[in-house]
Amino acid sequence: MMTETVVNVQEAPNNNAAPNKPQGGNDQPLAWIKINVDYFKTTPGLLKIAEFVLGIFCMALGSPAYYGGSHFFLFVVTVSFIGTIIWIFIYLLGIREALTFPINWILTELVNTGICTVFYFIAFILQLIVSSSFHPGHSRRGAQITAGVFGIINTVAYAFATYLLNVEWRGSRTNQ
């Protein structure tokens, strides 16, 4: 007959090891931040990067603003640029997943991107009208027109992002 041997191993406490949970909540105040680089490999993430880069070109080429249309163009570009930066940080730092507020993130981003699209559309038209009215010898005429062209491209990027967000929002509404 064979005998069985049962061994129970009990782990000894290690007082030198770091605790699993922070005590008092002050040891790791930013523990909720999770860097999410994979989002920027998706189509919406790439669109945000494109909006960011195109916004830089629009601001660089459209300034200084000489006339009212150019002022409005730069205002729209700057406000949209700041909004895009905020959304980039929301996705990069995983804030959507970390916050437990009852925010409809998709709808919020859809409204923001849709408003940016409409205002970009109006702004690039004004920018092209104003910059094409400069006399041909004006030193910044080419740069101002190029800013308007980059505004067209950025409008298309914002419009496509709005479309994708609309599809995602409608899909999330039917699943509930």
Image (cartoon, rainbow, N blue to C red):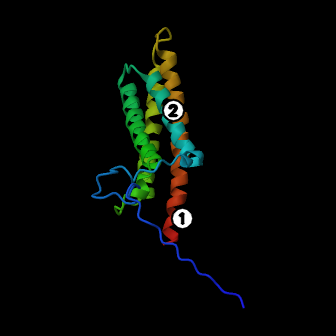
Residue at x-position 55% and y-position 43%: 47
Q: Which dot marks residue 171?
A: 1
In front: 158, or 19? 19
Image position, residue 120 (x, y; %): 45, 38
User: Which residue was labeled with disc 2?
Assistant: 53
Q: In this view of the protein, can residue 67 be seen by the observer? A: yes
Q: Is residue 56 above or below residue 38?
A: above
Q: Are marks 1 and 2 in contact (CB under 8 Å)?
A: no
Q: Residues within 10 Å of mark 2 (few under 14, many from 20)?
A: few
Image position, residue 176 (x, y; %): 48, 72
The amino acid marked with disc number 2 is Val
Image position, residue 96 (x, y; %): 42, 55
The amino acid marked with disc number 1 is Gly
Image position, residue 174 (x, y; %): 52, 70
Residue 30 as seen in the image, left or right of residue 158: left
In front: 39, or 32? 32
Residue pushed farthest right?
A: 1
Residue at x-position 36% and y-position 62%: 100
Q: How many badges with numbers are in the image?
A: 2
